[in-house]
Image (cartoon, rainbow, N blue to C red):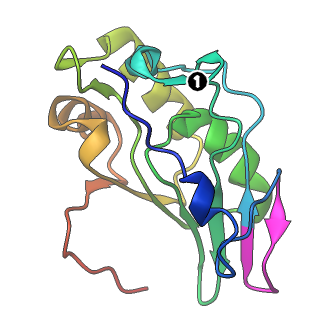
Amino acid sequence: MKVNIGIACEDSSHPQIKILDGNYQIDDELNLFTVTQTDRCYSPANNVLYDKDGKENFMHEQNLIIRENEVALIMGCGHSGIVNIMNEANIYQPKICIGGYHLFNPITKKTVSTDLLDSIANELQKYLETMFYTCHCTGREAFNYLSSLLPNLHYLTCGEELSY
């Protein structure tokens, strides 16, 4: 069954919606960026997601950098891959990273392989100064495994607050 989760055509002309292509600096403290390289540590949980042209490539997904007290990276489901996203975000040196890793397939109800999780953990160990907070689409099984390898990885649920 196909379900459209994109923006409705009639909403795209709304004055509060700005259609962007690529990176965008909102102001001195806020930057949006996209990820063009999605091949490292790719999650097969993405294989059930399609756009109008076929298999989704996620080149349009945006990630937000907030520079205030600390530099924070806010992602959505991280379909581009946490490793690829952190590679792009590294120029900002985020101290906090919040978002999903999309390591659980909602259709098959399966978590990605431990080989992939080991590769992700190996790559994220490069960012010992970053506190990672992940959520729903990572999946509890993947989170439990990754957090046993990464002491700076935490689970964040709806309604929780972080202060830095």
Whether residue 147 is situated above or below residue 130 in the rendered picture: above
- In this view, the residue in front, 149 or 120, is 120
- In this view, the residue in front, 51 or 155, is 51
Position of residue 67 measured from the top left corner of the image (x, y, whole percent): 67, 81
Location of residue 69 (image quadrant): bottom right
- Secondary structure found at label 1: loop
Position of residue 56 measured from the top left corner of the image (x, y, whole percent): 58, 24
Location of residue 58 (image quadrant): top right
Magenta highlight: main SS: loop
The residue at the point 63 percent across, 43 percent down is 85
Q: As shown in the figure, which amino acid type bears the numbered disc 1?
A: Glu
- Where are the magenta residues, as a range? 22-31
Position of residue 37 measured from the top left corner of the image (x, y, whole percent): 75, 28
The residue at the point 78 percent across, 34 percent down is 36
- In this view, the residue in front, 57 or 14, is 14
Whether residue 37 is situated above or below residue 99 in the rendered picture: above
The residue at the point 38 percent across, 10 percent down is 115
* Residue occupied by mark 1: 56
Whether residue 67 is situated above or below residue 102 in the rendered picture: below
- Quarter placement of the C terminus: bottom left
Position of residue 6 measured from the top left corner of the image (x, y, whole percent): 52, 46
Left of 3 or right of it: where is 139?
A: left
Residue that sits furthest to the front in the current view: 10
The residue at the point 82 percent across, 51 percent down is 22
- Quarter placement of the N terminus: top left
